[in-house]
Every structure is written in C-alpha cells, then in structure tokens.
Image: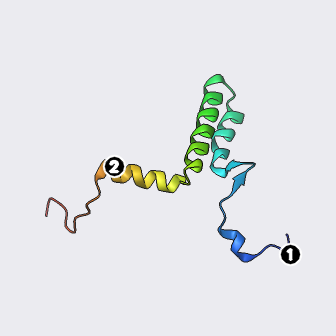
Amino acid sequence: MNPLAHWRDTARPAKFFIIDANIIWPIVIFVVAMSTRTLILLVLSAIFLLAIERVHFTIRKVVRYMFVFIVGPIRYRKGWWE
C-alpha cells in the first residue's frame, strides 16, 4: 500500500502496461487455449482497445453508442404496445 497515494487516484482506469486492463480477458482465453485463433483474438482486441483509447473512449461508451445506433436516440415514455 502506497501511503503517498491520494484517494482521487481510485477513479483512474486500470491499466495493463500501456493499454486498458480489459485486455486481461483475451489474455486469459489465450493462456487457457493457446491456438492461432486465440492469438488473433488477442491481437485484434488489443488493437481495438488501443484505437478506442486513442479517441478517449471507454468500452462503456462504445457499448452505449452501439446501443443508440441500433435502437435510436429517442426514448418513448410508453411502449409501442400500450
């Protein structure tokens, strides 16, 4: 435990060297089942995470934008069936 660490540092995103810590899941998949496919999955996911980090996005933001793209920006108060 670092006594010089400030409580505001808890809001920083977790990093695995220079990329987002979400890359740990493809790494785990690669370690469990080493094959060319899982290596390609690992490399592509690392490239994807670096690309979205470069434009200052997070995985959560990307999922939200995909949801808005699929569903649409308008939220209705009542369902279409009511």
User: In x, y percent, where is residue 44?
Assistant: 59, 34
Q: Nearer the viewer, residue 18 or 22?
A: 18
User: Would you name the residue on which mark 1 appears?
Assistant: 3
Residue occupying image coordinates x 61% and y 44% = 50
Q: Amino acid at mark 1?
A: Pro
Residue occupying image coordinates x 60% and y 38% = 47
Please identify the quarter of the rendering in which residue 56 is found: bottom right
In the current view of this chain or complex, which residue is farthest to the top? 36
Q: How many marks?
A: 2
Q: Is residue 66 above or below residue 31?
A: below
Q: CA distance from mark 2 to mark 1?
A: 45 Å
Is the N terminus in the top left, top right, bottom left or bottom right quadrant? bottom right
Please identify the quarter of the rendering in which residue 8 is found: bottom right
Structural crowding at the residue carrying mark 2, measured as other residues with C-alpha within 10 Å and reported as few (<14), some (14–19) or many (≥20): few
Q: Is residue 17 above or below residue 42?
A: below
Is the C terminus in the top left, top right, bottom left or bottom right quadrant? bottom left
Structural crowding at the residue carrying mark 1, measured as other residues with C-alpha within 10 Å and reported as few (<14), some (14–19) or many (≥20): few
- Name the disc covering residue 69, or none: 2
Q: Locate residue 51 relative to residue 70 in the image: left or right.
A: right
Q: Locate residue 13 relative to residue 74 in the image: left or right.
A: right
In the current view of this chain or complex, which residue is farthest to the left? 82
Q: Locate residue 76 relative to residue 40 in the image: left or right.
A: left
In the current view of this chain or complex, which residue is farthest to the front? 55
Please identify the quarter of the rendering in which residue 30 is found: top right
Does label 2 or label 1 sit earlier along the sequence? 1
Q: Amino acid at mark 2?
A: Phe
